[in-house]
Amino acid sequence: MQQEASLRPARAGDGQALFDVTHRSVAGLATGHYTPEQIAGWMGQRTPAFYEDLIARGRMVVAELGGEVVGFVDAEPGEVTRLFILPHAAGHGLGGRLLALGVAAARDGHAGPIRLEATINAAGFYRRHGFREVGRGQFSHGLGGDPIEIIHMELDGAGATTPAAG
């Protein structure tokens, strides 16, 4: 990734791009951690309209690189609910930047720990940013498809996440 991605609030019409980022991220980064059947069914009943509904809530931030949406984060008070990044944009600090924004949004109006549901492949990333494992379970933000094992993680209320170098 040569240039730095720009960050902006998600806007109406971004739903297809966010759908594509999620699908391509899972296909490229979760392979080897989940079965081919789980990956094939990951999107469940999601459609671009599902993402348009999330965008309308006004909490989502999108990362763009050269005009292409390459990642996004969504949060609600107390929880970072979604963070996806395209494989070619991963490993350059963008995920940390998005996570920091998601944590800040999750802290708005919330005093306790910040929660998230990490995929198995992403747990190390979240640990590097101060989250700790508090349990295991199945993905609760899904819309059909095969069950997806996740790791429940928390960041202490006073903890802070900063983008990792590189």
Image (cartoon, grey):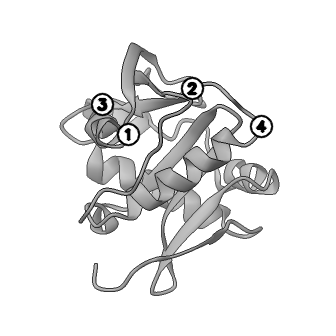
Between discs 2 and 1, the one toward the N terminus: 1
> Extreme front residue here?
158
Between discs 3 and 4, the one toward the N terminus: 4
Q: Which residue is mark 3?
A: 120
Residue in view at x 56 percent, y 45 percent: 103
Q: Compared with residue 20, is residue 141 higher up or lower down, i.e. above or below?
A: above
Q: Foreground residue, 74 or 88?
A: 74
Q: Are marks 4 and 2 in contact (CB under 8 Å)?
A: no
Camera-side mark, 3 or 4: 4
Q: Foreground residue, 13 or 118?
A: 118
Q: Which residue is mark 2?
A: 113
Kind of residue sitting beneath label 3:
Ile
Kind of residue sitting beneath label 1:
Ala
- Separation of residues labelled 4 and 2 (CA atoms): 12 Å
Between discs 3 and 2, the one toward the N terminus: 2
- Separation of residues labelled 4 and 1 (CA atoms): 37 Å
Q: Is residue 49 left or right of residue 119?
A: right
Query: Residue 27, position in %: x, y?
Result: 32, 50
Camera-side mark, 1 or 3: 3
Query: Residue 37, position in %: x, y?
Result: 32, 31
Residue 149 visible? The answer is no
Which quarter shows the C terminus? bottom left
Q: Which residue is mark 1?
A: 40
Q: Which residue is mark 4?
A: 109
Q: Compared with residue 147, is residue 74 higher up or lower down, i.e. above or below?
A: below
Camera-side mark, 3 or 2: 2
Kind of residue sitting beneath label 2:
Pro
- Separation of residues labelled 1 and 3 (CA atoms): 16 Å
Which quarter shows the N terminus? bottom left
> Extreme left residue here?
32
Q: Is residue 42 left or right of residue 125?
A: right
Query: Residue 87, position in %: x, y?
Result: 30, 61
